[in-house]
Amino acid sequence: MPIQYGSAVTLRYTLSDETGYILYQGDEPLQFTVGAGDILPAFEAALIGGEAGEVKTFTLTPEQAFGPYQPEWVFRLSRHQLEGCSEEPIYPGQVLILSTPEGDSVQVHVLSVDEETIQVDANHPLAGKTLTYTVEILRVE
């Protein structure tokens, strides 16, 4: 049965960047319903017509995947602005969840820390990257 919108799909995938560096190699199967909005639309579109047992390789541009890298989404916050955000000391590499004035949550990655400010990046970690997926379709229902 070929994959179509509404299909329940189980697959394993490997994700690599434009240099071939493997970013993710999943041992656990991923299960989702095509068209439910849980997966990148371009990822789903590349699977349409695929069948169980098939291996597909496809590449997504940054615009099809996690968007272009936005330099303006890298900014500094005063330590005062982050009071109560984390009980632990804040350090480079840490991921924080911040609240916007509108009440939305945004995930940021801490780039650097000094005595007065914290530099963060609100871009998705894969923003700006061309991504290649190799997908093994395990089941289609």
Image (cartoon, rainbow, N blue to C red):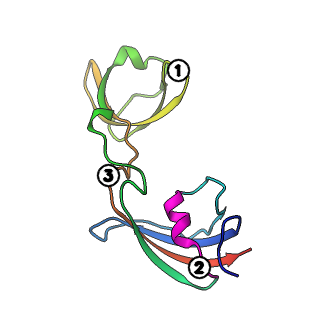
The circle on residue 50 is 2
Quote the CA–CA distance across marks 2 and 3: 27 Å
Residue name at image x 49 percent, y 79 percent = 56
- The picture places residue 42, in percent across and down from the top left corner, at 49, 61
Identify the image quadrant of the C terminus: bottom right
The circle on residue 128 is 3
- The picture places residue 61, in percent across and down from the top left corner, at 36, 60
- Give the left or right position of residue 46, taking residue 90 as reference: right
Q: Is residue 65 above or below residue 86?
A: below
Q: Quadrant of residue 60?
A: bottom left
Query: In the image, what residue type sits under mark 2?
Result: Gly
Query: In the image, what residue type sits under mark 1?
Result: Glu
- Give the left or right position of residue 73, taking residue 55 as reference: left
Instruction: Indicate which label's residue lies in the foreground, 2 or 3.
Output: 2
User: Which residue is label 1 attached to?
Assistant: 102
Using a 10 Å C-alpha cutoff, classify the residue at mark 3 as few (fewer than 14 neighbours), some (14 to 19) or many (20 or more).
Answer: some
Query: In the image, what residue type sits under mark 3?
Result: Gly
> The magenta stretch spans which residues?
40-51
- The picture places residue 59, in percent across and down from the top left corner, at 39, 69
Q: Is residue 43 above or below residue 56?
A: above
Residue farthest to the right, as pictured: 141
Q: Secondary structure at mark 3?
A: loop
